[in-house]
Image (cartoon, helix red, strand yellow):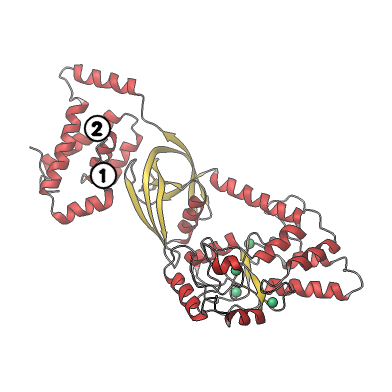
Amino acid sequence: MPRSRGASEEPDAPLPASAHVLEVARSVLLCVAGEHRLVDPVTLSCGHSLCKTCLSTARRAPADTVEPSLADRAVAALGSAFVGASTDGCLCPVDSCRTGAVARPSLQPGKNPRVDIVLQKTLEHIRRAETADAPPESLAADLLGDLECHICATLLHRPLSLSCGHTFCTQCLARSLDHAPSCPLDRSTLPGAAWFQSHPKAIALSELIRRAYGATWAQREAADIRQRQHESSQAPLFICSLSMPTLPTSLHVFEPRYRLMMRRAMETDRQFGMLLPVRGGVNSHGCMLRIRQLQLLPDGRSLVNSVGMYRFRIRSLGQLDGYAVGDIERLDDQSLELEAQAEREAVEADPPRPSTAEMLAQCRAFILSVETNAPPMALRRIIQTFGEVPIEPTALVWYVAAILPIADTAKASLLEIDSPRQRLEIVTSWIKAVNDQAPSLLGCRMS
Ligand SMILES: [Zn+2]
Ligand SMILES: [Zn+2]
Ligand SMILES: [Zn+2]
Ligand SMILES: [Zn+2]
């Protein structure tokens, strides 16, 4: 049986003594319905394991447990409308699951859990070792071989046991669910990504791995941390549309690679870069977005509500698991002193150029004319997409740029400009062009 390895090529951690593995396994593989050794174990969605026969007893529950039908209804409701893993209905006999403040669903909707295959194999190893005079030397290595995830072929990491009896690393299962809501091994139907969000790991199995194989477990944890650091060393990039600082961007995420990207963003700093696709590639400048809210739909798609934070320039582009990542340089607006100097030069020029205050007044007049003249539907769409009109001048300029009927490729050029005043000059020139050339475009005209 191959030894479990971490993601790196470092040597395997030393194996524990078989006697130690046996001792830990005996203390961990207990039924939560009583302090006895598990027999034909099933693992519930709360992470607790109990004997299949004890599960039937728990189902013919005393008065203080919830009727199975109610529990089934509650978890079924969870499967179709995930709002956080919380339900009053619970079949697990463990007190914290039954009466805890955050009760957890114990059964996958509509499913009777099958025997937990990894636990069953572990129990067989233990039985064989116990019937021998002394635990066989190979016990530690043999059992370790059965504690591998079938997706990543390394030691199970935060193992999650499914009602079909199979167990996978939490992260491996999440990635599999991005593609199909079924078990990767037997294709049995699973409730989908939303149901598994913050799903508890298999408790007995996690304890066995951590305590019996401490060194290998620590190596696996370290590999996971390294992997996450690698993932976060480059900014995730969504190549989709034009986003601008201070403005909201709403997205419907359905492609598996972007589901993965959003999950990783939610697990770290909730940020990702947005880049406008242009002919032959992507725009060189983009906007960093922060996820304000992510509504995960039961089938794994999600509705993402984000807001623009800052402009950036791409230094280099790469790929990570199918989506774009990049080494980016954050761009900040130039200093107030430089802005004040530009303002002085403009108003003292011959002939004088408009002041910032005059140009902001043009922006406000434009907004007012849109509010007055645009059809109600168009106005509603603007507010739905970009929110209410901002008061802060920098944000107002981005807002006006966003609603002007100008090509996105032209608007994207604003992301390269460090001077708010210069952006304002460009935006007011667009207002003039729109009013001069197509006064009916938004049903508005500057007077
Ligand atoms: Zn039992
Ligand atoms: Zn439980
Ligand atoms: Zn795995
Ligand atoms: Zn399965």
The amino acid on which the numbered mark 1 sits, given as a three-letter code, is Ala
Q: Which residue is drawn at 35% across and 35% down?
A: 416
Per the image, label 2 sits on a secondary structure element best described as helix
**In the image: residue 229, left or right of residue 148:** left
Res. 336 visible in picture: yes
Quadrant of the rendered image containing residue 360 = top left
Residue 296: percent from left, percent from top: 43, 61
Per the image, label 1 sits on a secondary structure element best described as helix
Q: In which of the image's four quarters is ligand 1 placed?
A: bottom right
Q: Residue at x 92, y 73 (%)?
A: 133
The amino acid on which the numbered mark 2 sits, given as a three-letter code, is Leu
The residue under label 2 is 424
Task: Name the disc covering residue 78, or none.
Answer: none
**In the image: residue 24, left or right of residue 99:** right
Res. 434 visible in picture: no
Residue 361: percent from left, percent from top: 16, 32
Q: Is residue 389 above or below residue 210?
A: above
Front residue (pair 133, 386): 133
Front residue (pair 95, 404): 95
- Name the residue at the right extreme: 133
- Name the residue at the front extreme: 63
**In the image: residue 88, left or right of residue 135:** left
Q: Which residue is drawn at 69% across and 71% down?
A: 118
The residue under label 1 is 402
Q: Distance between the residues labelled 2 and 1?
A: 13 Å
